[in-house]
Image (cartoon, helix red, strand yellow):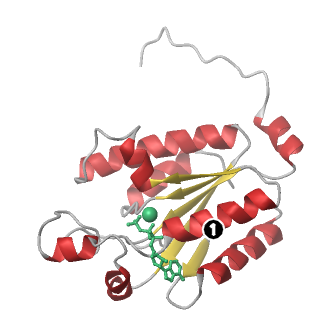
Amino acid sequence: MSSNIVWHEASITKTERRTQNKHHSFILWFTGLSASGKSSVANAFARTLFERGNQAFVLDGDNVRHGLNNDLGFDEVSRKENIRRIGEVSKLFVESGQIVLTAFISPYRQDRQVVRQLVEEGEFLEVYVKCSVETCEQRDPKGLYKKARNAEIANFTGISAPYEEPEHPEFILDTERYSIEDCVEQLTSFLTDKGYI
Ligand SMILES: Nc1ncnc2c1ncn2[C@@H]1O[C@H](COP(=O)(O)OP(=O)(O)OP(=O)(O)O)[C@@H](O)[C@H]1O
Ligand SMILES: [Mg+2]
């Protein structure tokens, strides 16, 4: 980084924004296999937060890859860079007082750890969207598992690339057992109990 780049302090602090919003700002980092339900639950929960009058925004893997990260592929180095950039963007959202819900497979523990360390204590909540690869493959809403099985897609998480389960996630959503609505309720209770919303 150039030594000529000097940080300029913001005129409105994160604390002031939180006070005005009347809720904490933080990252809910949904991680899990493709078709585990990250986007479905994140969007359903964002809707609930919005209707409660909370500031919430979803950053979704596919959407970010259409724009900001459209220069990145799916090899390990690209996935790392993908997550790093998303982490930095998420941090800006936290700074702006919002609840940011991220829906990325983010298969590597190390990469998720990088984001955790990017923000302050209590600003990164890892939500493990748990669902067996068998069920994900049965759901296959985008037909990606089928393509991965036919070797039409390389480096597909759960099939031809690893998924490293979170060791100490702040929250686990079992989407095999619970419906999207149940998951939204569980998240609402969890965050209310924590005093975050
Ligand atoms: N309990 C549940 N929770 C979430 N999704 C469910 C559940 N039961 C069934 N589904 C279905 O499973 C699919 C999950 O797809 P979704 O796109 O949300 O997964 P994803 O984790 O975002 O995958 P990707 O990483 O490919 O974007 C949807 O078709 C959804 O309707
Ligand atoms: Mg998704």
Q: Give left or right: position of 146 versus 36.
A: left
Residue closer to the observer: 5 or 99 = 99
Residue behind label 1 places its C-beta within 8 angstroms of ligand 1: no
Q: Residue at x 78, y 52 (%)?
A: 24
Tell me where residue 8 sits by quadrant: top right
Tell me where residue 44 sits by quadrant: bottom right
Assign a secondary structure to mark 1.
helix
User: Which residue in the rendered view is the most extreme toward the top?
Assistant: 4
Q: Residue at x 12, y 75 (%)?
A: 150
Q: Quadrant of the N terminus?
A: top left
Percent x, y of residue 32 = 43, 70
Residue closer to the observer: 90 or 40 = 40
Q: Is residue 99 visible?
A: yes
**On screen, 50 above or below 117?**
below
Q: Which residue is mark 1?
A: 44
Q: Residue at x 52, y 83 (%)?
A: 175
User: Which residue in the rendered view is the most extreme toward the bottom?
Assistant: 177
Residue closer to the observer: 100 or 162 = 100
Q: Quadrant of the C terminus?
A: bottom right
**On screen, 104 above or below 10?**
below
Percent x, y of residue 160 = 19, 71
**On screen, 120 above or below 126?**
above
